[in-house]
Image (cartoon, grey):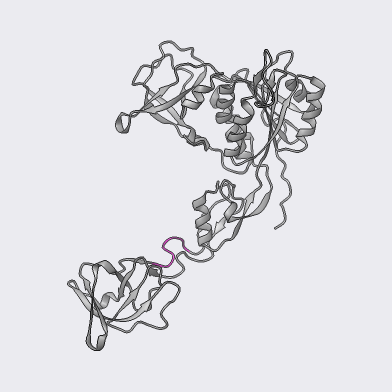
Amino acid sequence: MSDTPRPKRLLDDCFLHDTQRLRHEQAIEILRSRVAPVTAHERVAIVDIAGRVLAEPAVAVRPVPAHTNSAVDGYGFASADYGAAGARLPVSARVAAGHPLEGKAPPATAVRIFTGAVLPEGIDTVAMQEDCETAAGENGAMTVSIPGGLKRGANVRRTGEDVAAGETLLEPGAMLRPQDAAALASIGLADVVCRKRLSVAIISTGDEVIRAGSRPLAPGEVYDANAPMLSGLIGAAGADVHDLGVWPDDAAEIKRRLADAARHYDVLITSGGASRGEEDHMVEAMDALGKRHMWQLAIKPGRPMSFGQIGDTVIIGLPGNPVAVFVCYLMYVFPVLRRLGGAPWPEPRRYMLPAAFEITKRKTGRREFFRGWLVGNGAATAVDKYARDGSGLITGLRAATGLIEIGEDVTAVAPGDPVAFIPFSEFGIPA
């Protein structure tokens, strides 16, 4: 199959808003309403579809199972030859999977049958072999004693009981899983049409930032923790990740590199340089090359973010602190990447659980995301939070298994109060 034409990716000003400081729900609504799939199509072998987005409906051209067959090893018989007390019948044939019986089974007989074997004409019920007793009859012929109590159709898999012919198994936009590969193979498909993987480049910025392993730290320098974290997060979203390294605090160099990168990738994600400081040249370069919309979000951590575009390439500017990068990525960037890649907008599920912590005084007007985990079990399950809330404390991310979401109008949290817990598994991250 040839590639489909490359779609128009973005409407002009697709991230534009007219609010000074956006609340979380307002930000989500803007993104959800204005971001659409951007990637072309390609045919993918089903052995390679895990994590891909389906582009065309997957329709069964034949039923599954294709033939009525036995669900167990045992003895098949016609219910008309069977009474409430059971039956003793001569065994007239042996039927194995892949070797159907030619013709109809003789009346008033049973057949020895194995799991997956096609039921012969005239047979409608199967007894499990461990419930039956066999004996040699006259002239050495085998008979089988079948116990009573079996309903007509017992231990039989009917044609089409799993999938009917003409049924749509999966709709466009489905994020394909290994079990979907099994379903597609069962209807005879060797490949399906998927969206191409979104191409995402990550850029770290700052003269103080160096890559781990490159050399010892000099005074004032920090190792780049954001790039490896973003690489794993973006890969879990089903996109291809390209690391463009650490860019210096040089306005002309950033502008040159940004213009070049925008010609090669669907999305550029930067970390650091998202504010309006004198050395934050990324903002100036975005303004000069395309359209940038600085977002001040009413959230903690991660207030400053920028969204924009250079041509049809999406540019997302994240804060510099790792915890803020992590939270902003999960809540805003992850759904954008999934939607741009062709999947429906993924709204993470929130589980209301009692708090195992206390917040006595809290500034209202902003939504907060704390790092947390489950404690207790069963009916006593609660959620606890990391003791320190600094946005540079990576240890809290490692300890957590999800985010605790506290709404804008909550003034305090007492132990036992219900709070919303969003597991990291909602974003494809193992606990």
Stretch of the chain drawn in magenta: 158-164
Q: Is residue 418 left or right of residue 129?
A: right
- Residue 273 showing in the rendered view: no
Specify whether residue 411 is painted magenta: no
Measuring from the top left, give residue 117's x and y in whole percent: 40, 71
Residue at the extreme left of the image, as rendered: 85
Along the viewing direction, whichever of 147 and 231 lies nearer the viewer:
231
Picture quadrant of residue 418? top left
Question: In the displayed structure, would residue 153 be above or below residue 380?
Answer: below
| Total tally of numbered discs in the picture | 0
Taking the view exactly as shown, the residue that stands out farthest to the top is 361
> In the displayed structure, would residue 304 be above or below residue 161?
above
Occupied quadrant, residue 279 = top right
Name the side, left or right, on which 28 lies relative to 219: left
Which residue reaches farthest front? 216
Q: Is residue 197 above or below residue 151?
A: above
Q: From this viewpoint, which residue is outermost toward the bottom? A: 139
Could you tell me residue 177's position as x and y percent?
52, 48
Query: Is there any visible trace of residue 4 in the rendered image?
Result: yes
- Residue nearest the viewer, comparing 395 with 30: 395
Q: Residue at x 35, y 18 (%)?
A: 415
Left-right relation of 281 to 369: right
Q: Quadrant of residue 240?
A: top right
Q: Main secondary structure of the magenta part?
A: loop
Residue 354 location (% of width, % of height):
35, 24
List x then y, in percent, for residue 182: 50, 56
Nearer to us in this view, 110 or 83: 110
Residue 188 vertical position relative to residue 135 in the rendered view, above or below: above
Residue at position x 70%, y 58% in the image: 1
